[in-house]
Amino acid sequence: MTDVATPPVHHPAVAHELARAGHAQLRIADLITRFAGSMPFVYVHVVVFATWMLVFERSPWPTLTLIVSLEAIFLSTFVMIGQNRQAAFQQLKADHDFVAQEKELHVNTDLTRIIERLVREIHETVRND
């Protein structure tokens, strides 16, 4: 017996998403979104804004308002990119699951018909003997 590791089998929607995740733009968006949703992001902002307001700017509010507004615009865009990717993933997975369930329904229906036909044939054979 060999110790060859078999690659994991993924749902087709997961495989599609893994293939898409290789794109540089999506990787960058994922990194930014992951960092923006973390406590280090909060800590960095607290330190940077506090230092800026207390040390470097005499009247930081107009510039601070502008920078925070621009940052919010970009962060909301990254959140929307992530939501769109998640929605596309969920739709792809749901479409695949629907097709698989439809195929299974047809197979089960065919099997049920075959069983019914076999039962009738058995009954006819038993009745005639």
Image (cartoon, grey):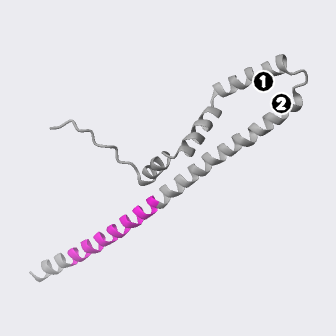
Q: Which quadrant of the figure has residue 104?
A: bottom left
Say few, some or many: other residues with alpha carbon within 10 Å of mark 2 (under 14 / 14 to 19 / 20 or more): some
Residue that lies at the very extreme toward the right in this rendered image: 59
Q: Which mark is residue 49?
A: 1
Q: Main secondary structure of the magenta part?
A: helix
Q: Are marks 2 and 1 in contact (CB under 8 Å)?
A: yes
Residue that lies at the very extreme toward the top in this rendered image: 55
Q: Is residue 91 above or below residue 63?
A: below
**Magenta segment boundaries in residue numbering:** 96-120
In the picture, measured across the screen, residue 17 lies left or right of residue 79, that is left
- The quadrant in which the C terminus is found is bottom left
Q: Residue at x 42, y 54 (%)?
A: 12
Q: Residue at x 73, y 20 (%)?
A: 47
Q: Residue at x 64, y 26 (%)?
A: 39
Say few, some or many: other residues with alpha carbon within 10 Å of mark 1 (under 14 / 14 to 19 / 20 or more): some
Say which amino acid is labelled 1.
Phe
What's the distance in space between the residues labelled 2 and 1, CA to CA? Answer: 8 Å
Q: Earlier in the sequence, mark 2 or mark 1?
A: 1
For label 2, the residue is 64
Q: Which quadrant of the figure has residue 63?
A: top right
Say which amino acid is labelled 2.
Leu
Percent across and percent down for residue 18 are 45, 47
Identify the element where label 1 is drawn. helix
Percent across and percent down for residue 93 are 48, 55
Instruction: Give 92 or 103, whichever is nearer the viewer.
Output: 92
Q: Is residue 26 above or below residue 106?
A: above
Q: Is residue 126 above or below residue 98?
A: below
Percent across and percent down for residue 105 are 38, 67
Q: Which mark is residue 69?
A: none
Instruction: Give 102 or 58, whichever is nearer the viewer.
Output: 58
In the picture, measured across the screen, residue 55 lies left or right of residue 36, that is right
- The quadrant in which the N terminus is found is top left
